[in-house]
Image (cartoon, rainbow, N blue to C red):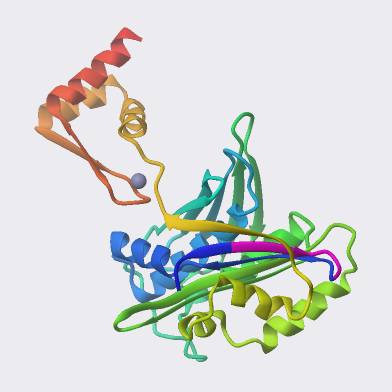
Amino acid sequence: MPDLIISASAPGAGFSIVAAITTDLVREAQRRHGLSPTATAAVGRLTTGAALLAAGLKGKERLSLQVAGDGPLRGVVSDAWLIDQERVGARGYAKNPQADLPLNERGKFDVAAAVGSGSLQVTKSFEVGQPYAGVVPLYSGEIAEDIAAYLVNSEQIPSIVALGVLADPDGIRAAGGLIAQLLPGADERAVATLEERALSMPPITKLINEGSDAHALLHALAGGAELRSHRTIDVQFSCRCTREKVEAALLGLGADELHKMARERTETEATCEFCKKMYVFTSDEVNELASRLKKA
Ligand code: ZN
């Protein structure tokens, strides 16, 4: 199934719902970062969550999810934004991409142990003005439950979140997710119905692996509810790094440090932590950056 996000609302039943297939996106993140299986599950779940939430953004807004934890992954970061009205871009990484743990007693990736205890920060950046950030303690470290706890406790929106990555020794078989949220003013019992259905559904990665597309996922959770205003959005691994942004980071080191770097090595390499793209600066270019600081 191709990567895709579909959103809809069920006004009669009182909820909105977003479904995503992100198999290719997670494969690309795994390949770029050389993620271990456990790290792939953590980064894949968090990046899928960011992509699902980004489907509700407008214009140049951007959403960043930062998991800080004391487990071996040492933290996971993902963000997502609208590239245009038809496309969501998303990216993510783990601070320790090689961290790996045995499967848990249920035979699943032990993301909770790899993440550890800590917090989830959600930051929404706007085209103008200050970003908005909310932080909640991690609920379980399994990511989906942590995002649901954030939505319920910080945004006061009763929500169901399901995120999954299915992998075997041959690679990533399926990845995707679902988020359903209570519509403003709707009866809270709608969430209990959705929760029951979510618990009785097969895992979403099993559905995707067996051929379900994003529409089928949406309907699996929505049940027979009448869905309106379907919106279809492409989703892809993407990065926002540019040479100018890397230059700005180097300028932050100060003129003395830049001159020292230019003396000590013929080339300075800077790698984007989100996409692993490497930017190379010759010593002449590093000296030129330092001279910009002196002129300023
Ligand atoms: Zn990048």
Q: Residue furthest left?
A: 266
Query: Is residue 9 on the magenta stretch?
Result: yes
Residue 60 covered by magenta stretch: no
User: Who is closer to the viewer here, 72 or 247?
Assistant: 247
Q: Is residue 273 above or below residue 127?
A: below
- 155 above or below 189? above
Residue 123's spot in the image, x, y percent?
60, 46
Across and down, in percent, residue 111 comes to 48, 74
Residue 155 percent across, percent down from the top left: 75, 54
Q: Is residue 280 left or right of residue 7?
A: left
Asked whether, in this view, residue 171 is left or right of residue 163, the answer is left
Residue 65 sits above or below residue 213 on the image: above
Q: How many marks?
A: 0
Residue 244 horizontal side relative to residue 267, left or right: right
Write down the region rendered in magenta: 6-12
Farthest residue toward the top? 295
Q: Quadrant of the N terminus?
A: bottom left
Looking at the rendered image, the quarter that the C terminus falls into is top left
| Residue 193 occupies quadrant | bottom right
Is residue 69 visible in the rendered image? The answer is no
Give residue 224's quadrant in the image: bottom right
* Residue 30 seen from this side: yes
Q: Residue at x 18, y 30 (%)?
A: 261
Q: Which residue lies at the image location 45% right of the left edge and 80% below the top edge? A: 109
Q: Main secondary structure of the magenta part?
A: strand
User: Whole-percent x and y of residue 254?
Assistant: 31, 23
Residue at image location 81% in from the left, 78% down from the top = 192
Judge by depth and name the residue closer to the eye, 20 or 38: 20
